[in-house]
């Protein structure tokens, strides 16, 4: 997929938001850059290691990445209609409030506040520290993760202009690193490794797609594609959102599918499965086979820079949801406070605190599972909600209509509902088998939603008193 020359054009001015100035908004190219920066993060450089624990067939792995991309594309197609019909920042919080009930929207926004961005930021910081500390073992991983989290937050909390410039540069580096990685992986001689890894291709059967291993791998891949809806969270900052939100969502998702599939095939072509199975630093391990020990270390650092780009993008996008919620709910009004340059600094530092707690206390795999359940549920309700939105608002302006409606919504709903059920079922099985003291994924997911509902009720009471 060709990328226009203006795709990553530096537009630092568009983020300036002084109270006395009319904000300059981003075009479709810049909005797409934010979507790509959100999508391409820890997932593509970590998921394969966990997939190989359950399936080592290259055809199965390719199908997993294609299906995961197809699910994300279905979601992007539907979000394009909703974003064009309801162009306001907040993503699922705004959509679900309009489609179902303000309480449902609040719970979705609450989920975004607690885990929607804070948890992926924590995961990216943990993966970043894992890469860097693998190269320089003298650095304590959690300390390095907290330092990077704090430094990136400082940029976005005090200077939107500097943060925007850094984001644009990091996103350019991110795409270039992946392209170079793929081209180098095709050039290097790895026939022996490829022959060993691809020898099981003939053993693939359709039945493999219905195994437990395939289901678990699909969950990891769907996590890698998370972020495809990023443009929906910053609609207020996008020029002509009714036109540019669909362009950003669908174009970025298609572009990322191509990169993801190519990168994972390069991993399998150049690196023995035995070395990648169960490992987090897949990119670093593969880079050492492609570029050698020293070149691999350099590429590992570049991969770390890519993760910095993801962290930076989420640190920017996440607080915009909190700010939108604060505008509507008195109990969260403090999150709307901005400094003279327009940064929602209270929301940004609240997100830093939540992410920091997860970095210091959580494990990579547990946080991913916990995050996947609650975020998948919100996305499921939103995508399927396009059907209700059409019935509830038949006269609403729809500059973009879902392609092949309602097929993408139904397919997305079926696949995501299946993955949620499977994750919860696995959680209980692990608890019953004695692997965990409690079904933590289920309890944390329910606890997040119940606590959010209590906060919503308190917010309603405060509103009635004023």
Image (cartoon, rainbow, N blue to C red):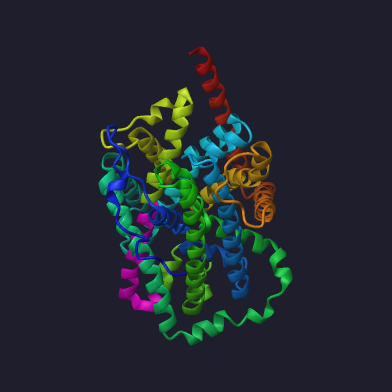
Residue 144, magenta (yes or no): no
Q: Is residue 296 magenta?
A: yes
Left or right: residue 145 compared with residue 214: left
Residue furthest top as drawn: 465
Q: Nearer the viewer, residue 375 or 438?
A: 375
Q: Is residue 75 above or below residue 381?
A: below
In-image side of 34 versus 213 (left or right): left
Residue under the image location 48 percent in, 27 percent down: 328
The residue that appears at 53% across and 37% down in the rendered structure is 94
| Number of marks | 0
Observer able to see residue 369 = no
* Nearest to the observer: residue 191 or residue 231: 231
Residue 455 percent coordinates (x, y):
53, 26
Give the residues in magenta: 287-311
Residue at the spot x=68%, y=79% of the render?
A: 203
Location of residue 447 (image quadrant): top right
On the question of residue 173 being in view, the answer is yes
Above or below for 222 versus 263: above
Task: Tell me if 161 is positioned left or right of 78 in this view.
Answer: left
For the stretch drawn in magenta, the main secondary structure is helix
Q: Position of residue 324 (x, y in %)?
A: 45, 34
Instruction: Name the spot of residue 314 as percent of width and height, x first.
Output: 41, 48
Q: Position of residue 344 (x, y in %)?
A: 35, 35
Q: Residue at x 40, y 30 (%)?
A: 335
Q: Quadrant of residue 391?
A: top right
Q: Closest to the observer: 464 or 188? A: 464
């Amino acid at each position: 997929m060709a990328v226009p020359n203006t795709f990553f054009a530096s537009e630092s001015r568009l983020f300036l938001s002084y109270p006395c100035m009319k904000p300059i908004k981003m075009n479709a190219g810049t909005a797409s850059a934010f979507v790509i920066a959100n999508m391409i993060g820890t997932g593509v450089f970590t998921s394969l290691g966990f997939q190989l624990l359950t399936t080592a067939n290259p055809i199965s792995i390719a199908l997993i990445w294609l299906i995961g991309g197809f699910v994300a594309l279905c979601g992007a197609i539907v979000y394009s209609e909703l974003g064009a019909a309801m162009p306001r920042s907040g993503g699922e919080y705004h959509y679900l409030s309009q489609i179902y009930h303000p309480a449902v929207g609040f719970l979705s926004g609450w989920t975004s506040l607690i885990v929607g961005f804070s948890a992926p930021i924590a995961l990216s910081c943990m993966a970043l520290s894992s890469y860097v500390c693998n190269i320089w073992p003298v650095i304590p991983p959690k300390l390095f993760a907290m330092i990077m989290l704090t430094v990136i937050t400082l940029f976005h909390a005090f200077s939107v202009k500097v943060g925007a410039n850094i984001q644009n540069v990091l996103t350019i580096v991110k795409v270039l690193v992946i392209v170079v990685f793929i081209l180098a992986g095709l050039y290097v001689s790895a026939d022996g490794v490829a022959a060993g890894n691809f020898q099981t291709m003939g053993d693939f059967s359709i039945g493999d797609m219905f195994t437990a291993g395939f289901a678990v791998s699909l969950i990891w891949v769907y996590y890698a594609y998370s972020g495809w809806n990023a443009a929906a969270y910053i609609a207020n900052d996008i020029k002509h959102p009714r036109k540019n939100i669909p362009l950003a969502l669908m174009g970025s998702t298609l572009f990322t599918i191509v990169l993801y599939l190519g990168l994972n095939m390069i991993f399998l072509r150049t690196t023995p499965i035995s070395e990648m199975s169960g490992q987090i630093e897949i990119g670093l391990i593969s880079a050492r086979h492609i570029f050698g020990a020293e070149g691999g270390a350099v590429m590992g650092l570049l991969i770390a820079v890519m993760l910095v780009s993801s962290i930076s993008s989420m640190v920017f996008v996440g607080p915009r949801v909190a700010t939108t919620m604060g505008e509507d709910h008195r109990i969260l009004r403090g999150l709307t406070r901005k400094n003279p340059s327009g940064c929602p600094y209270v929301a940004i530092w609240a997100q830093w605190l939540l992410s920091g707690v997860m970095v210091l206390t959580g494990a990579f795999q547990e946080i991913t599972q916990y995050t996947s359940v609650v975020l998948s549920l919100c996305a499921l309700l939103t995508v399927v909600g396009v059907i209700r939105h059409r019935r509830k608002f038949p006269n609403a302006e729809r500059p973009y209509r879902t392609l092949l409606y309602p097929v993408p919504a139904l397919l997305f709903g079926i696949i995501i509902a299946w993955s949620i059920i499977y994750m919860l079922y696995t959680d209980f099985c692990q608890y019953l088998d004695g692997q965990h003291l409690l079904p933590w994924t289920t309890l944390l997911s329910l606890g997040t939603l119940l606590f959010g509902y209590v906060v919503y009720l308190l917010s309603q009471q405060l509103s009635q008193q004023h």
